[in-house]
Amino acid sequence: MDLIKRWAGLLAVAAGCTVSASAAPLLSESFNDITALAANGWVFVNDSSPPGGTSWFQGDPAIFAAAAGPANAYVAANLNNAGFGGAVSNWLLTPELALSNGESLNFALRLLGEGFLDTVQVYLSTGGASTNLGGFNLLGSFDSATDTGWIDHAITVGALTAPASGRFAFRYVVDDTSIHGDYIGIDSVSVNATALPVPGTVALIALGMCGLAGALRARRPVERLAICGLALAATAAQAAPDNGLMTFPHVNVVTQLAPPQQAAAAAGGLKAYKDPATGKLGDPSQDQAAELDKAIRASAAGPRARSSRPATIHPPHGGVGVVLDEAHTQYSVHKNPAAQGEQK
């Protein structure tokens, strides 16, 4: 059994040598100063009709802070990219990059909404340094009429027939600024190349081959089976290309969203279902909740008269206040002490 222990020890040492050897990101942009983007190969194309008074601009921390870094370190756009009643089509193109299958575009996105539908689409062009918008293909679309908070997204490049060069693009879309569109932010954009083989993976494969050779020299069948098992595990173990973690056959590793992202990704808000027969409020079933979400989305996507952004005030005693008009509703929930005592 000493031989088995030796092989197990070597396998453990080799597994501990799995240090990620991923290539450096092809692109990493935190938007600390968007005036430097053009010099770094970024391209702004405001194709809105009619053009408005804004394009892409430095994030406004008074509206919301950046996902990371200084409060204004993100790039933003708003409904004023087009004239009132016009259509927003505002493009932000990354620098030209070397593209291959397996690369990932990572970014943080926040759609403010505030009752007005915001949409951001992500595109890819394999046309080199070309800025021809017709050469971009849609990869994904994100929309919301309510504040999503910052959400991290990752889109993986696939279906390329051969390595190429081109650009990714973000497009802010609003079909009619009189009823849709508010404010959006993009932060922490990076493009990560396909990971290189990690040293630990090579070591494990070599160890597996040595193990198979050792099994042939083992005297007893039990030792042979044990060594073969360790050797097969060594040759089958691989390092995940995105984070260098070890993976084994028939084992799935699932990355869960952090609690704040989980909450933002879910359909938020307080929902209550009114029973049509009894008139009582209660928690909706899964089907009832789906119908409520559908009604909310339909309502948000429908025409709505636009009002000015609520004014903020700063009382002398501190804090921040918002001046609401008749378009807003205040409500509060209170416990009934009498009813609470009856339940006891």
Image (tube, rainbow, N blue to C red):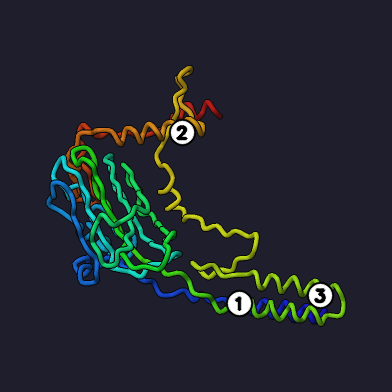
- The residues bearing labels 2 and 1 have C-alpha atoms spaced at a distance of 47 Å
Name the one closer to the observer, 305 or 154. 154
- Amino acid found under the numbered disc labelled 1: Gly
**Which quadrant does the N terminus fall into?**
bottom right
Can you give x and y, in whole percent of width and height, for residue 344 in the image? Answer: 56, 29
Residue at far top of view? 277
Q: Is residue 318 left or right of residue 189?
A: left
First of labels 3, 2 by sequence position: 3
x and y percentages locating residue 79 in the rendered image: 20, 47
Residue drawn where x is 44% and y is 24% of the image? 274
Q: Nearer the viewer, residue 9 or 87?
A: 87
Q: Secondary structure at mark 2?
A: helix
Task: Tell me the amino acid under the disc marked 2.
Answer: Ala
Give the residue furthest to the right: 220
Kindly identify which residue carries mark 2: 289
Tell me where residue 26 sits by quadrant.
bottom left
Residue 52 in the image, given as x and y percentages of width and height: 13, 49
Q: Which mark is residue 224?
A: 3
Which residue position is annotated with label 1? 16
Assign a secondary structure to mark 1: helix
Q: CA distance from mark 3 to mark 2?
A: 58 Å
Residue at position x 81%, y 82% in the image: 217
Query: Mark 2 or 1 closer to N-term?
Result: 1
Amino acid, disc 3: Arg
